[in-house]
């Protein structure tokens, strides 16, 4: 038979090395040595968390409890505050975890803590990533999910090694809380860290408000400059329009003068043609006169000779 837990991990692309002999049971809770060890480690962690919550000051803590018919791994209460711890030994489904948290909050639960292996899912939900679910002497350590204030005051993920017992004690005493680092991710930190984070955010918001106010002033000045430029452009357009009207009038005048010039040129051409004809006529009459005078002279000369 195939181990159901291994089949799930294979579907998720997570390898656990070589396979071992399994029993005849199937499903995700089969009886193979790996599944038995994992179930034992998970159950041991349930009871260990329950004991640590009671030791930290919880008024009530219960393993495998039900909240309004919703099964939970560990339920605890301190005064009017009611919280739940969910333990997962494998990858955490973000959609299911968020839906489960909403159902619990609708049932009156104030907070939900997920204890699971390290992975990309840890910053997306109120979870802590535990590297080893079977440590020696129940020395559980948190390797992912905690945040700390940086040099600028903003909270950021930290690799500081926290013990799960210290974390649970601070959580029960309301000294550790989960919050958003940005729009999508968050983490667990002490209240003082969140106070510094909030103060840094307030300072950043105030700085951005100042920058926005300065930008608005610059925008107002720019708008005033643009309005003045628009007025200047309007005046220039008006001048251009008037110049266009004047140019049209001048063009009409020039067209009239050009027409008169063409008419004068026609008259001049006619006069030149008339003068040319008169010149030719005068030349012809001059030739005729010369010929007549020569003829008269010839006749007179002949008459004188004949006498």
Image: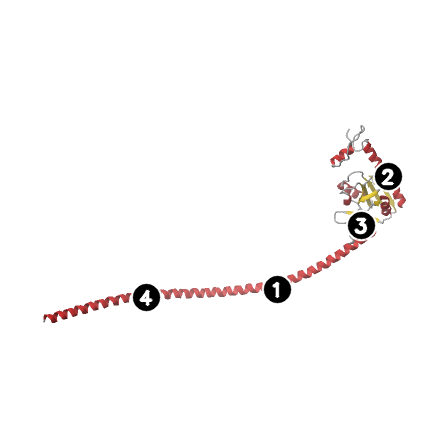
Between label 3 and label 2, give the one nearer the viewer: 2
Q: Earlier in the sequence, mark 3 or mark 4?
A: 3
- Sort mark 1 into few (<14), some (14-19) or many (20+) by Cα contacts within 10 Å: few
The answer for how far apart the CA atoms under marks 1 and 2 are is 79 Å
Report if the CB atoms under discs 1 and 2 are less than 8 Å apart: no
Looking at the rendered structure, the number of numbered marks drawn on it comes to 4
Look at the numbered disc 2 and give the secondary structure of its residue: helix
Q: Where residue 99 sits in the image (x, y, percent)?
A: 77, 42
Residue carrying label 1: 228
Residue carrying label 4: 272
Report if the CB atoms under discs 3 and 1 are less than 8 Å apart: no
The answer for how far apart the CA atoms under marks 4 and 1 are is 63 Å
Identify the residue at image location x=82%, y=32%: 33
Q: Earlier in the sequence, mark 2 or mark 4?
A: 2
The answer for how far apart the CA atoms under marks 3 and 4 are is 109 Å
Residue carrying label 2: 136
Between label 2 and label 4, give the one nearer the viewer: 2
Residue sitting nearer the eye, 101 or 156 = 156
**Numbered tag placed on residue 148 in the rendering:** 3
Q: Is residue 123 left or right of residue 216?
A: right
Look at the numbered disc 3 and give the secondary structure of its residue: strand
The answer for how far apart the CA atoms under marks 2 and 4 are is 131 Å
The answer for how far apart the CA atoms under marks 3 and 1 are is 53 Å
Between label 4 and label 1, give the one nearer the viewer: 4
Between label 3 and label 4, give the one nearer the viewer: 3
**Numbered tag placed on residue 73 in the rendering:** none
Toward which corner of the image does residue 2 lie, by quadrant? top right
């Amino acid at each position: 038979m195939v181990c159901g837990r291994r089949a799930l991990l294979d579907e998720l692309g997570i390898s656990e090395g070589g396979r071992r002999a399994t029993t005849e049971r199937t499903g995700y809770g089969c009886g193979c040595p790996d599944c038995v060890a994992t179930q034992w480690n998970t159950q041991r962690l349930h009871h260990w968390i329950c004991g640590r919550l009671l030791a930290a000051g919880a008024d009530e803590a219960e393993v495998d409890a039900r909240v309004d018919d919703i099964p939970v791994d560990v339920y605890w209460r301190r005064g009017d505050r009611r919280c739940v711890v969910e333990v997962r030994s494998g990858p955490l489904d973000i959609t299911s975890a968020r839906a489960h948290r909403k159902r619990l909050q609708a049932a009156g639960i104030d907070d939900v803590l997920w204890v699971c292996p390290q992975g990309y899912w840890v910053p997306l939900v109120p979870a802590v990533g535990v590297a080893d679910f079977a440590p020696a002497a129940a020395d559980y350590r948190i390797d992912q999910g905690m945040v700390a204030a940086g040099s600028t005051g903003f909270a950021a993920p930290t690799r500081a090694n926290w013990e799960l017992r210290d974390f649970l004690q601070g959580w029960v005493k309301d000294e550790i809380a989960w919050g958003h680092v940005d729009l999508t991710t968050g983490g667990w930190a002490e209240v003082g860290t969140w106070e510094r984070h909030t103060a840094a955010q307030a300072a950043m918001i105030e700085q951005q408000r100042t920058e926005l106010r300065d930008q608005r002033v610059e925008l107002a000045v720019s708008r005033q400059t643009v309005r003045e430029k628009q007025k200047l452009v309007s005046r220039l357009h008006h001048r251009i329009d008037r110049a266009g009207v004047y140019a049209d009038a001048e063009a009409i005048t020039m067209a009239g003068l050009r027409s008169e010039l063409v008419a004068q040129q026609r008259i001049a051409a006619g006069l030149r043609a008339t003068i040319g004809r008169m010149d030719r006529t005068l030349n012809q009459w001059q030739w005729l006169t010369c010929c007549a005078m020569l003829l008269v002279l010839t006749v007179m000369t002949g008459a004188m000779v004949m006498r």
